[in-house]
Image (cartoon, coloured by chain):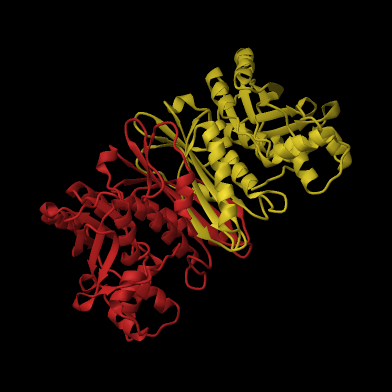
Chain colours: A yellow, B red
Amino acid sequence: MIDAIERRLGQRGGRVRRSVGDDAAVVDAGGSVAVTSLDSFVEGVHFSLATHSPADVGHSALAAALSDLAAMGAAPGEVFVGIALSSEFGEQRALELIDAMEALAKRVGATIAGGDVVRSPALSVTVSVTGWAADAGDLVYRDGARAGDLIGVTGRLGGSGAGRLLLSGLRADLSAGARNGLVTRHLRPQPRLRCGRELARAGVSAMIDVSDGVATDAGHLARRSGVELCVALDRLPLADGVIKVARAAQRDPTELAATMGDDYELLVTAPPNVRARVQRAAGDGDSELTWIGEVGRGEGARLIGAGGKDVELQGYEHR
Amino acid sequence: MIDAIERRLGQRGGRVRRSVGDDAAVVDAGGSVAVTSLDSFVEGVHFSLATHSPADVGHSALAAALSDLAAMGAAPGEVFVGIALSSEFGEQRALELIDAMEALAKRVGATIAGGDVVRSPALSVTVSVTGWAADAGDLVYRDGARAGDLIGVTGRLGGSGAGRLLLSGLRADLSAGARNGLVTRHLRPQPRLRCGRELARAGVSAMIDVSDGVATDAGHLARRSGVELCVALDRLPLADGVIKVARAAQRDPTELAATMGDDYELLVTAPPNVRARVQRAAGDGDSELTWIGEVGRGEGARLIGAGGKDVELQGYEHR
């Protein structure tokens, strides 16, 4: 569908450097470039009010949009919010939703600068975020991966997916603290804005945020770059508690971490000669980086399991 | 609700010149300023698939968003579209919707640069548009009206509202051509982008687009400027056919034209000394301008009817 749309769209005015197909669009603004991404979140599709408070909805919608700016290496700027309110979702809850967005915006230095509030049969939130960079060359796109590059991922994976399973009623052998950590990871994801900028400066060749799961997002990056991303599944860094949750769900922990998405970590490729610099940059961005594979000359994502066997994983396409 | 939200929001980074409360937000981008507005349109609330084709939905959603840029005097730039598709609204119809947006974007020189497509129980379209100006001082805001200014409006009013009544089944004594003209006015509104820029250059003191109807929008402008807008209802320029439709609906044509909204004409205030220049500017913008009142020292909108009596009109708050 997105591909079909992309083929129908033309560009005018000469300002647009990047449009559909990357994490965000890049527009030349004269003295700087504007980086914009728009995301929609619908009750019953992307979240449920049975598990998400209004504040969780507001936070996670903005976090997901900001994560696209992180994946470009842009500094966050302005936020525009469209809220479609169902009749059951009253004004008080709408303000709780906004308050959580405002708290996150404040923490990352962004400004909620406008939007629209309308009535609707279903609650939904659409967030448009604009970030800024001095020059389009300072940003990192999905299409820069080259054969021979290393593949890295920030933080740990599977925490959000495990939290989602727990919220949906799964019982696992976890302490209250561990359970809470995973649930918070799902309800309150943190966009890796600082880390994204540090990684861009350190010279990563391509970057994407892990919203659909590494299995799917590695495929997106591979297709845009015209290369193959070979990911060693046993090298994926798992969040604490994911193994226990996977056991309770009778699933493979690595498969869970690679496919459930919503971790909003950053997946990067980097030439071997900047390996140490990129690793340090992740630390400067208050995260850690794990090398999980290599870029090859093929196409798409190749997921390598135990014993070097190729694994087919169905990614969780959450939007 | 919007006021309650506005009170809760802070600003960071020093780039935001205007945020919530005007037609669009204004952000300093270094060599230029970005002007952004976001609008949401929901099936069953803002339009009905019983009367709107997918192309009508796409066109009118983008036209309404672009109209906010017109009301700032900004040149259109980039468009970001969030489409929430109901299961009945298939891919083919979604592409028809996008094609109509792309056709309008092309005609006004804008670029659809990104967006999101999600599933939803209800069809909705959220459009974020960004326009550009060399300097924030080149734009026109809602808060610049001063006592003694004249009030003008572009084009003719009531056409869209009359078209909506006809679409909803009203029978009126109209030729097929006249009926079609009114229906088209409702389904395919035209944003006054060129006219907005000409009026800004000519020195209007405040400007707003007529989306909710003059009765309501004059009130918005008056409140933001801290003045009173006195509008003589008998001076409102009526679109052809509005009198006949109003007669069929047993309504006063002037009341219909002042309250039904969706005309997307521009309401301006201007000091008397630029009167002739402003009038010429509207002509240069392929429109016409009618003077409909004066700005006074009171507050809010004052609607003056036959015999100089004040009239209370309930505006059509369509979002």
B78 w.r.t. B179: above or below: above
Which residue appears at 47% of the width and 72% of the height?
Answer: B51
Q: Residue B94, image x and y in percent? A: 54, 59
| Residue A131 as seen in the image, left or right of residue A304 | left
Please name whichever residue, A267 or B122, is drawn nearer the observer in this view of the structure: B122
Q: Looking at the rendering, in which quadrant would you find the C terminus of chain B?
A: bottom left
| Residue A92 as seen in the image, left or right of residue B24 | right
Q: Residue B261, image x and y in percent? A: 36, 67
- State whether residue A105 appears in this view: yes
- State whether residue B116 appears in this view: no
Q: Residue B288, image x and y in percent? A: 20, 62
Please name whichever residue, A316 or B271, is drawn nearer the observer in this view of the structure: B271
Quadrant of res A68: top right
Which residue appears at 31% of the width and 80% of the height?
Answer: B252
Q: Residue B185, image x and y in percent? A: 35, 68
How many marks can you see?
0
B35 w.r.t. A227: above or below: below
Quadrant of res A12: top left
Please name whichever residue, A284 or A318, is drawn nearer the observer in this view of the structure: A284
| Residue B62 as seen in the image, left or right of residue B303 | right
| Residue A179 as seen in the image, left or right of residue B253 | right
